[in-house]
Amino acid sequence: MFQGVWFDSYFTAFFSLFVIMDAFGALPLFLMLSEKIPKAKRVKAANNTLLVAAILLLIFIFGGSAILNYFGISIPSFQVAGGLILLIIGLKIVLGLKLGAQQKHVELYEFTAVPMATPLIVGPGTITTTIILVAQYGYVLVALAALLNLIVMWIVLRNAFFIYRFLGHQGVEIISRIVGIILTALAVEFIHEGLVALVSGSSL
């Protein structure tokens, strides 16, 4: 019984992070930024990107709650605010909106940290989701879910050109839009749960 509950919680945490990190949505930008560098350096770029993303995720998994407490922000309030951010990101993906100019080709050590690791992989949405999940499921489970998501992201980025050729531009777009719809629904759930907690005066 306990194992079943743990597995369900782990799947929920993993899938929540999988949707917001959006590995397939990161493909087009990674391809654009790395198109002029040799294959060996593309692999190194994927490694560097995931290393920076992993460090950032660990910081917010184990220190996110402390940051909120320092500023006097409750989890329900953060959940509502974060849900609104996720809602905007989800609608942006579904509707294909561009918020800000896309960054053109830059040097390897520039694009692996910014914009790939952050804000693309570990941005406001990922940070929000991570802190909320830790409040619900604890540090260990969320850390394991984040680790598996980073492995998935690493595999996708290391094989970015092959995956893109296999799926095609339209295939990647379709997957991204589906992810966007799921993310929008997840955002509504976050907002709903946060509002319920605020109205009832309880905390997650």
Image (cartoon, grey):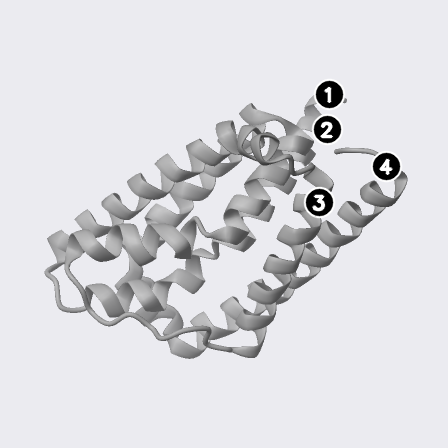
Crowd rating for badge 2 (residues with CA inside 10 Å; few <14, some 14–19, many 20+)? few
Residue at the outermost front position: 71
31 or 190, which is in the foreground?
A: 190
152 or 113, which is in the foreground?
A: 113
Disc 3/disc 2 C-alpha distance (Å) = 27 Å
- Residue drawn 43% across the image and 48% down it: 122
Coordinates of residue 45 in the picture (x, y in percent): 21, 51
Nearer the camera: disc 2 or disc 4: 4
Disc 3/disc 1 C-alpha distance (Å) = 30 Å
Disc 2/disc 4 C-alpha distance (Å) = 27 Å
Q: Is residue 13 above or below residue 31?
A: above
Q: Amino acid at mark 3?
A: Ser
Q: Is residue 112 above or below residue 170?
A: above
Coordinates of residue 11 in the picture (x, y in percent): 62, 39
Coordinates of residue 201 in the picture (x, y in percent): 86, 37
Disc 4/disc 1 C-alpha distance (Å) = 29 Å
Q: Amino acid at mark 2?
A: Val
Mark toward the start of the polypeptide (2 vs 4): 2
Coordinates of residue 106 in the picture (x, y in percent): 18, 64
Disc 3/disc 4 C-alpha distance (Å) = 11 Å
Q: Quadrant of residue 157?
A: bottom left
Give the left or right position of residue 96, taking residue 13 as reference: left
Disc 1/disc 2 C-alpha distance (Å) = 5 Å
Residue at the outermost right position: 200
Q: Which residue is mark 2?
A: 5
In the rendered picture of this protein, how many numbered marks are placed on residues?
4
Q: Which residue is mark 1?
A: 2
60 or 96, which is in the foreground?
A: 60
Q: Is residue 2 above or below residue 64?
A: above
Quarter holding the N terminus is top right
Residue at the outermost top position: 2
